[in-house]
Amino acid sequence: MNIVVCIKQVPDTKGGVKFNPDGTLDRAAMLAIMNPDDKAGLEAALRIKDETGAKVTVLTMGLPKADAVLREAMAMGADDAIILSDRKFAGADVLATSYALSQGITAIGDIDLIICGKQTTDGDTAQVGPAIAEHLGIPHAAWVSEIVDADSESIQVKQDLVSVSQTSKIPYPCLITVDKDMCVPRLPSYLLQKQSKDRPVKIMTFE
């Protein structure tokens, strides 16, 4: 079983928010962290890995410095890490971001499950995950609050929607988006950090 977790490096707003004169976030002046919802998604993938032996690949789109959150992911237990990085990706909105990520996932190939955080702290649209699924033409479930079961053919999840909760069973390949409150992420392992420090983070360009 092959799982891709989409993660994003976002500004750490706990230290205060700083803006450029044009009103955009001054990302260079702020510390960067792994998006909290994405970290919960990574933990969900790692729990499936613990139970089934699945391979977990983390994927992000951003500058090469996003290497930091990918290395944190490998120290938590991810097997491979890939950055989509190219000047042609700059300024991407939801449509462009989701399309680029979908093409990155297609290039990786042979993926059963894609896990995304419900939303990011800097964008807050909650649209990228479902849009990736639409680009790939696969089923998806958003607002997942619990993974009930994951076998070799499908995943069963609980979704907490606005007025109801429902349980859905979705065949692979599929995508789910999860909330940061779904689970408590594990801490990075010093042993895994040492083992992965020389492991390359792959760069995937527009070409």
Image (tube, helix red, strand yellow):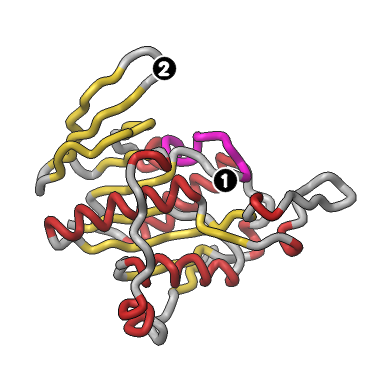
- Counting residues from the N terminus, which is met first, the one under dot 2 or under dot 1? 1
Q: Residue at x 22, y 54 (%)?
A: 47
Q: Where is residue 164? Give x, y as percent.
A: 32, 15
Q: Where is residue 44? Give x, y as percent.
A: 29, 49
The answer to which quarter of the image holds residue 80 is bottom left
Describe residue 13's horizontal placement relative to residue 181 as left or right: right
Describe residue 120's horizontal placement relative to residue 46 as left or right: right
Q: Looking at the picture, tell me which residue is in the foreground, 103 or 116.
A: 116
Q: Where is residue 138? Give x, y as percent.
A: 30, 38
Q: Residue at x 57, y 40 (%)?
A: 94
Q: Is residue 72 magenta?
A: no
Describe residue 1's horizontal placement relative to residue 85 as left or right: left
**Residue receiving disc 1:** 96
Distance Cα–Cα, label 2 vs label 1: 28 Å
Which mark is drawn over residue 162?
2
> Closer to us: mark 2 or mark 1?
2
Give the main secondary structure, helix, strand or loop, of the magenta stretch: loop
Q: Secondary structure at mark 1?
A: helix
Q: Are marks 2 and 1 in contact (CB under 8 Å)?
A: no
Q: How many marks?
A: 2
Q: Looking at the picture, tell me which residue is in the foreground, 172 or 121.
A: 121
Q: Secondary structure at mark 2?
A: loop
Amino acid type assigned to the residue bearing label 1 in the image: Ala
Other residues around mark 2 within 10 Å, as few (<14) / some (14–19) / many (≥20): few
Q: Residue at x 46, y 52 (%)?
A: 101
The residue furthest right is 21
Question: Start and end of the magenta stretch?
Answer: 122-131
Q: Residue at x 33, y 45 (%)?
A: 183
Q: Looking at the picture, tell me which residue is in the foreground, 107 or 176.
A: 176
Q: Is the N terminus in the top left, top right, bottom left or bottom right quadrant? A: bottom left
Amino acid type assigned to the residue bearing label 2 in the image: Val
Describe residue 164's horizontal placement relative to residue 101 as left or right: left
